[in-house]
Amino acid sequence: MKENAKFQFQGFKIKKSSIELNTDEQGELDLDFNLSGVINKGSGVFELDMGVFISNDEKTVNIETIAVGNYSFPLDQEFENLKNFLYLNAPALLFPYVRAYISTLTALSGIKPITLPTMNLSQLKESLEANTTIIE
């Protein structure tokens, strides 16, 4: 019999999205992230907010997208064993959806689509952990 994974991605939604284009030339783009989360130990739920900010040096391209990913974990799981799933795997699972959303958003805006590279987000682990609220 097939057993479900202990840590599961339940889905996502786009909480906020804005795009400002004041030129057809994108130039060199800067990418920044802002991650925060809420862990509810009582219900076995983790909610991850992933803010992705894209701009160029001239500030003629400004894109902001905030996505919320929802995850579940078993209540009997030792919290220390979950930390890598919450702080490493959760952003890695959500990012491809945000990446596809931004590519589609820019393609439908009449400009050359912005395709973010695939990325290793492990450098964001400490920031996410520091910006996560835990509800007992």
Image (cartoon, rainbow, N blue to C red):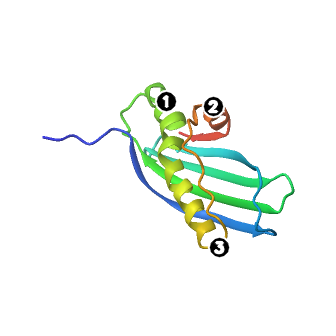
Q: Secondary structure at mark 1?
A: helix
Question: Which one is earlier in the sequence, the residue at label 2 or at label 1?
Answer: 1
Q: Where's the N terminus, which quadrant?
A: top left
Q: Residues within 10 Å of mark 3 (few under 14, many from 20)?
A: few
Image coordinates of residue 22 in percent, x first then y, are 81, 69
Question: Which one is earlier in the sequence, the residue at label 3 or at label 2?
Answer: 3
Residue to which mark 2 is pinned: 123
Q: Residue at x 70, y 59 (%)?
A: 64
Residue to which mark 3 is pinned: 109
- Residue 61 — which label? none
- From the viewer's perspective, is residue 33 above or below residue 23? above
Q: Is residue 70 left or right of residue 107?
A: left
Residue to which mark 1 is pinned: 84
Image coordinates of residue 43 in percent, x first then y, are 43, 47
Q: Residue at x 50, y 41 (%)?
A: 92
- In the image, 69 versus 123, the foreground residue is 123
Q: Is residue 40 visible?
A: no
Label 1 to label 3: alpha-carbon separation = 37 Å
Camera-near label (1 vs 3) is 3
